[in-house]
Image (cartoon, grey):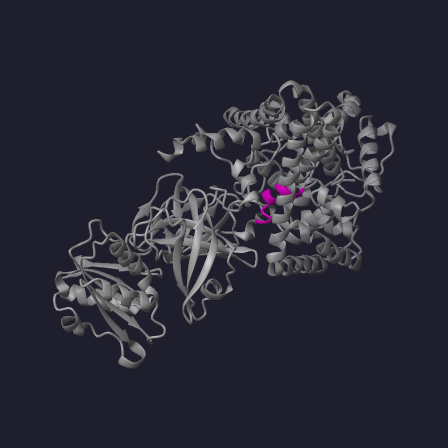
Amino acid sequence: MAISDVKEYTHLTEDEVDQIGRELDQIRADIEESRGASDAAYIHRMIRIQRGLAAAGRITLLAGTQVKETRKPALALGAGLLGVAKILENMEIGHNVMHGQWDWMNDPEIHSSNWEWDTAQPAEQWKHSHNYIHHQFTNVLGYDNDIGYGILRMAREQKWSPANLGQPVYNALLASLFEWGVALHDLDVERIRKGKKDPKELKRQLRQVVRKGRNQVLKDYVVYPALAGRRWKSVMAANVAANVTRNLWSYMIIFCGHFPDGAVHFTEEEIADESRSEWYLRQILGSANFEGGRLLHILSGSLGFQIEHHLFPDLPSNRYPEISEKVQALTAKYDIPYTTGPLHRQYGQTLRTILKLSLPNSWTSSDQPEPPTPPHDRKRRGDDERPSRRSELGGWSRSSAQARG
Amino acid sequence: MASTIPWERVRRSASKLTTPLHPDDYLRLLNPLWSARELRGRIEKVVPETEDAATLVIKPGWGWRYDHRPGQYVGIGVQVEGRFQWRSYSVSSPPERKRGTITITVRAMPEGKLSSHLVSGLEPGTIVRLALPDGEFVLPDPPPPRMLFLVGGSGVTPVMAMLRTLDRRGTMPDVVMHYSSPTQERMIFREELEEMERKHDALTLHRLHTDTDGMLQLSDLDTICPDWRERETYACGPSPMLDAITEHYEENDAADRLHLERFSLELGGEGGEGGTITFQNSGKTVEVDGATTVLEAGEEAGIGMPFGCRMGICHTCTLTLISGKVRDLRNGDEYDSPNEPVQTCITAAVGDCKLDI
């Protein structure tokens, strides 16, 4: 069932909803008040570790492959180091810096306005498609382009078409080529297909993607292999392995954020007159956490705290564990569902939904507690049809087509 | 140009290996000074000058050109509780590349958390951020044949850079210096100035200890330095002192010989007209009057505005003005070209405008 009113769904009174909003605002204020040297030290340490791993991986691959005896272990070790470095950079560092989690440090080297990450998508487009579209319109059908990324049918309200039969294949392709799927995400293929995209804007975005993607491809598949001389094939294979590892991992983590059972969808009636407190509630109901140790959380960019991240996208990620305790106490107090579970179960549920929804609704049963609402038109909204952005989501800016020439 | 030296080219080619980062982003992990992305320096020594003032000897990292003009200031950014705070101080060392360091002299201000931290809380080895030298309060080259320095308290620092340059070059013209300080003990550079006075006949020093002898009466200038009207005058010190000096020079038709350095925001120009400021990224808008700076307006609207000195000298707060017009509150200069960088801490809206943040 897609929810049209969070208040009604959670059986809360208007006063209770407002009170929840105030308590969440207080959690935010407490963290903002206490940000300090140890938080700054955390992100600096992460960056140091990540760059160290990346350098170690590259050097291991270049040097270790030159001698026959060390070739195989060097390939495995180098690809592993590089893969972990890319995962850390994309998730715990890049994603979180671009949300503005570290802007408070007033350090232009670690700032959402100019951070560029180690993946094909230009930061500017990410900040639009993710910070604005996904975080503000989380799980609202027709507004949040992350519900299936325009490729997969992820809600029973989305109309079935025979093309959905291919979902298992599309899913596997999306997972292994995730970097490139993300790179094309903000172009909004669905609006292009329907002829609704401004061609000038499309051209500008494409140029950006090509420029960024070209540098990424050159680095991993031309320059580093060339430096390895006769061993270029080995280095190229290791770089492919590192990129694919990162793709599969980030795909899995991100799919566990909103698709496990329990994370619900919303209709556009919900956002029509949504208050800030109701926006908070929607974030809790539409997101899913997963459980794990500190290392797992860091490697997944703290997205195991998806609920906390959606409530406070711009608070430093190292504080999510303590925020989570407070949020869980709050949801328990007001009897609000709080979805979490071990990673394998969360992904298992996601995969089952992908497979089930490749078939028409009548062939399968719903895994959500309530029956689905009637099919929803799949029209996507453009920026001019959406409300303007909330500030806590982290910045994004569109350099105008004119300015870029 | 320096940008065509092979080293620059090497770094540019190396960026193919480090994209989307710069080679400097990795090199600075080996040595914190090996980065030109943001200018930085290492505190080498903290030399106490008086009980509340100290000289910081800073070794700048890559990208520093040692080309400041004597009298200019630099911005210094220090991380306090994880956050960079910026202030500007006059460089007290003469511009010389072979020294490999620059010095700034800081007095701990009562209530001045950052200045106290700089004087007593900085360990040698600390990495600080630097901003390029700036300022028009500089020693002309060649120096004027007759000069007068009117100095109060820590206002001595830019003057010291000028005197040291003149001393080092051996081109000391006819200089009279009046130096007010609360007590003898609090007089920064007391011994060095005495030394210089002994060495150069052309340098005359007039000291005043204001705790015991009262403030400088400008009518006394006629006795301290009878030909003051004919001298190029450089004054640096507390605002009330500078205001009094300005008035006195204007009354005596000598204002065109007076050069001032102020270390506080002086809103001399007219205000803006006010309007609606739009912050592009958040879509937030705020209605402001003509006296509110763009920075204050943004902070009021809850935007995470970058800021530094808050008085228009360090340029940390600079943002791009997408459209509209702002006015510099210090001098009335207006900025209205699309996508023009503006200093938010000293500008106010003239009509509606939009900023890129």
User: Depth check: B47 or B26 in front?
Assistant: B47
For the magenta stretch, what is the residue range?
A: A92-102
- Which image quarter: residue A329? bottom right
Q: Position of residue B30 (x, y in %)?
A: 56, 43
User: Depth check: A294 or B101 in front?
Assistant: B101
Q: Is residue A288 above or below residue A201?
A: below
The rendered magenta stretch, by its main secondary structure, is classed as helix
Q: Left or right: where does residue A225 sit relative to residue B68? A: right
- Which image quarter: residue B320? top left
Q: How many marks?
A: 0
Q: Quadrant of the C terminus of chain A?
A: top left
Q: Is residue B7 above or below residue B78?
A: above
Q: Left or right: where does residue A108 sit relative to residue B170? A: right
Q: Is residue A370 magenta?
A: no
Most distant residue in the front direction: B199
Q: Quadrant of the N terminus of chain A?
A: top right
Q: Position of residue A111 (x, y in %)?
A: 54, 45
Q: Is residue A101 magenta?
A: yes
Give me the residue at 80% from left, 56% from top: A335
Q: Position of residue B51 (x, y in %)?
A: 42, 72
Q: Left or right: where does residue A19 sit relative to residue B273? A: right
User: Depth check: A275 or B338 in front?
Assistant: B338
Give me the residue at 73% from left, 55% from top: A327
User: Depth check: B21 or B24 in front?
Assistant: B24
Q: Position of residue A183 (x, y in %)?
A: 62, 29
